[in-house]
Amino acid sequence: MMNIKKTISLSIIALILCVVFGASSASAESTSTNAAQGMQISPTLVDLNASRGKTYEIKLNVVNITSSNLVYTPSVDDFTAANETGAPKITTDSNLPTSASIKTWVTTVSKLNLKSQQQSTIKAQITIPDNAEPGGHYGVLRFSGAAPELETTGVGLSASAGVLILIRVDGAITEKADVASFYTATKNTKADPEISENSFNQTSFFEESPVLFVTRIKNDGNIHIKPFGNIEVRDMFGGIVKTLKVNESKSNVLPKSTRLFEAEINKDWMFGKYTANLSVGYGTTGQALTNTITFWVIPYKLIFVALIIITTLIYIFSIMLKSYNKRIIQKSKNEESKSKKRSNKKG
């Protein structure tokens, strides 16, 4: 009987090990296959100041980071801001005005054959038309890879990798921005994953830190800008509590779009009224944007507990005081009674 139990136990353990290692092997194979689907490219962003009628050359370093030989097909698309995070949204809208599109401005290799882990440097030319409108023009140069045997079928194309191209065409440049909103808030956990103004619950009252600052900059000009500045937080006595950076990464805000920037103050103890002064600069001539808000940090739960404790202590003290007074009065009465008795005996 003991041998049978032992045999069954060993069989079960062996089965579990087979299942575990089999699942791990399958998972590793799947990960390896999925990972072998891309290209590494640098730089990932080209910011070009350009003049009409001129041609510019950019160099890109590309690496086939897959485990297979791939043929990469380049394509050029325009892009806009997808949301207030500044994430690019590729657009293939054929109705986009020719003057706003850079699709016909960029020329590069027709196709690129790269072996596994092979690196190459490719050149792309950007020709600015004579009739290009002054201001910002934006596009993305993408490379989509496919195995050579699948190239003609279009099957098995991988997710493309690319470089963002920001072009500033000289001329009548308009740099105009404004603070769309500046406020304190808490995170809205029920909002959509994509960050927008709905991702926050605007409020001026907090029980405790952290306090989240939301700054939304609107670009009304015709060129991208990099707003950068500080939020200076002062307490009710005017002392500086914290200075926070706005857009420390120097991200761009595209024309006719709004971008949201977050900053946070997190201190162990905050109490009372606070003032936050926003100061942001942008543009080639250092234009300034300012705004001021106030907010309160009141730890009402802690205050409520403290009040209960104080009230309870006062109540206990009053009872003790009454009891003490009663004892003193009673003792006085007893001594007075004894004194009268002694006087009566003498009489």
Image (cartoon, rainbow, N blue to C red):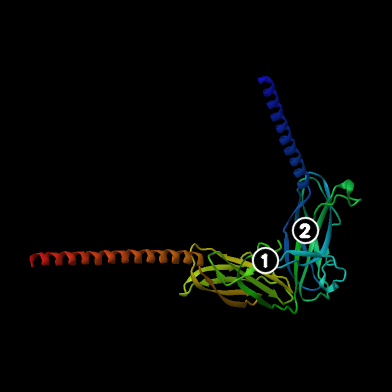
The picture places residue 327, in percent across and down from the top left corner, at: 26, 63
The C terminus lies in which quarter of the figure? bottom left
Total number of numbered discs in the rendering: 2
- Between residues 235 and 54, which one lies in front from this camera angle? 235
- Between residues 184 and 7, which one lies in front from this camera angle? 7
Residue ID at (42%, 63%) = 309
Query: What is the residue that sits farthest to the left in this orientation?
Result: 346
Q: Quadrant of residue 50?
A: bottom right
The picture places residue 162, in percent across and down from the top left corner, at: 77, 58
Image depth: mark 2 or mark 1 in front: 1
Name the disc covering residue 318, or none: none
The crowding category of the residue bearing disc 1, from other C-alpha atoms within 10 Å (few below 14, some 14 to 19, many at least 20), is: some
Name the disc covering residue 162, or none: 2
The answer to whether any part of residue 299 appears in the image is: no
What element does badge 1 sit on? helix
What element does badge 2 sit on? strand
Answer left or right for 182 relative to 158: left
The picture places residue 317, in percent across and down from the top left corner, at: 35, 65
- Between residues 248 and 298, which one lies in front from this camera angle? 298
Answer left or right for 308 relative to 187: left
Residue ID at (75%, 69%) = 167
Mark 2: which amino acid? Gly
Q: CA distance from mark 2 to mark 1?
A: 29 Å
Residue for badge 1: 199
Residue ID at (10%, 64%) = 345
Residue ID at (22%, 64%) = 331
Sequence-wise, which precedes: disc 2 or disc 1?
2
Answer left or right for 84 relative to 77: left
Q: Quadrant of residue 324?
A: bottom left
The answer to whether any part of residue 157 appears in the image is: yes
Mark 1: which amino acid? Ser
The picture places residue 58, in percent across and down from the top left corner, at: 76, 61
